[in-house]
Image: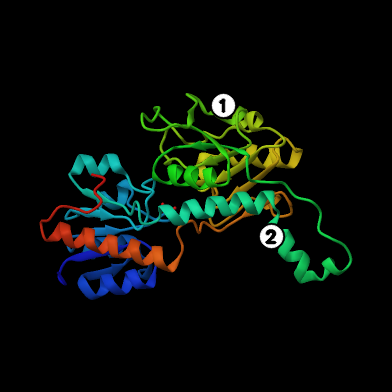
Amino acid sequence: MDTIGVLMTCPMYSYLEQELDARFNLFKLWQHSSKVDFLKTNQHKIKAIVGNTKIGADAELIDALPELEIVATFSVGLDKIDLRKCKEKGIRVTNTPDVLTDDVADLAIGLILGVLRNICACDGYVRSGKWKDADFELTTKFSGKSVGILGLGRIGAAIAKRAEAFGCSISYHSRSQKPNSNYKYFSNVIDLAKNCQILVVACALTEETQHIINQEVIDALGPKGVLINIGRGAHVDERELVSALLEGRLGGAGLDVYENEPEAPEQLLGLGNVVLLPHVGSDTIETSNAMADLVIANLEAHFDNKPLLTPVI
Ligand SMILES: O=CC(=O)O
């Protein structure tokens, strides 16, 4: 397969890069100062794109590659791929579901505990020596709280399972009620927010879910409510979130994703009731290796004319 051109859109994970390089004719888009010149010269060589949550395959890139057959993203999220265009042109698409579910769900629980138990500030308290002067202030209990989950897909369900182990009551909103779930279903996100203490965003980012967490939802969650986002920054109207946190209309937030990554809103940096992570939901060695292996297995299957392992299109 070493003559098949594979284009990586940006630096991702060195193991993935090495393994792709060992198997295919690998092109690294970011190493070329002129993307236009690079594409003009190499457009007929490239049959596959490997993108990620930062740079995927937009309509412009897809149109620039007449021999493109497959987009294999190193992510579960598909929001950086023009799926409509891929469908139109008969380009196959794969992602990396399942292998990252546990890590993302684990981190959602970590964010909840981080916000409620103020873990980051506790750590700073010990390190700064302040503990010697006084005990740390009281925090908020997690066990037994009501948790609302927006999107009961693989990751949402894994978060629900973990929260259940903390004795939490679970409710959810998704496009349709899940026939096999015993969790309480709300047909709209405002009612879900009104009826839970912790709201976790775990749905896919689509045109319909863009800014699904707006002022109304935030106000429904209220001054004691906590918002956790392990989905995508664009799920949340970040300006509204910042105002609500600054004005005390929302109790707290745990965020792994932001609207303008790698930026987090400046006004949040000084707040004690937020925990901010740099989009690391699936970033463990074990899971990154599994994701990379899955990207490669999908590409090899495609070029061997075998069924794709995790087809989207
Ligand atoms: O955000 C992470 C992913 O989509 O895999």
Crowding around mark 1 (Cα neighbors within 10 Å: few <14, some 14 to 19, many 20+) is some
Across and down, in percent, residue 113 comes to: 63, 52
Labels in figure, total: 2
Q: Is residue 308 positioned above or below 125 on the image?
A: above
* Circle number at residue 120: 2
- 247 or 142, which lies in front? 142
* Circle number at residue 171: none
Q: Quadrant of the N terminus?
A: bottom left
Crowding around mark 2 (Cα neighbors within 10 Å: few <14, some 14 to 19, many 20+) is some
Query: Mark 2 belongs to which amino acid?
Result: Cys
Mark 1 or mark 2, which is nearer the start of the sequence? Answer: 2
Residue 192 visible? The answer is: yes
Under circle 1, the secondary element is: helix
Residue at image position (42%, 41%) is 204
Residue 273 left/right relative to 137: left
Across and down, in percent, residue 64 comes to: 25, 53
- Pointer 2 and pointer 1: residues touching (CB < 8 Å)? no
Q: Is residue 168 positioned above or below 219 on the image?
A: below
Q: Residue furthest left?
A: 305
* Circle number at residue 190: 1
Query: Mark 1 belongs to which amino acid?
Result: Ile
Q: Residue furthest right?
A: 133
Residue at image position (45%, 42%) is 156
| C-alpha separation, residue under disc 2 versus residue under disc 1 | 30 Å
Q: Quadrant of the C terminus?
A: top left
Residue at image position (81%, 54%) is 137
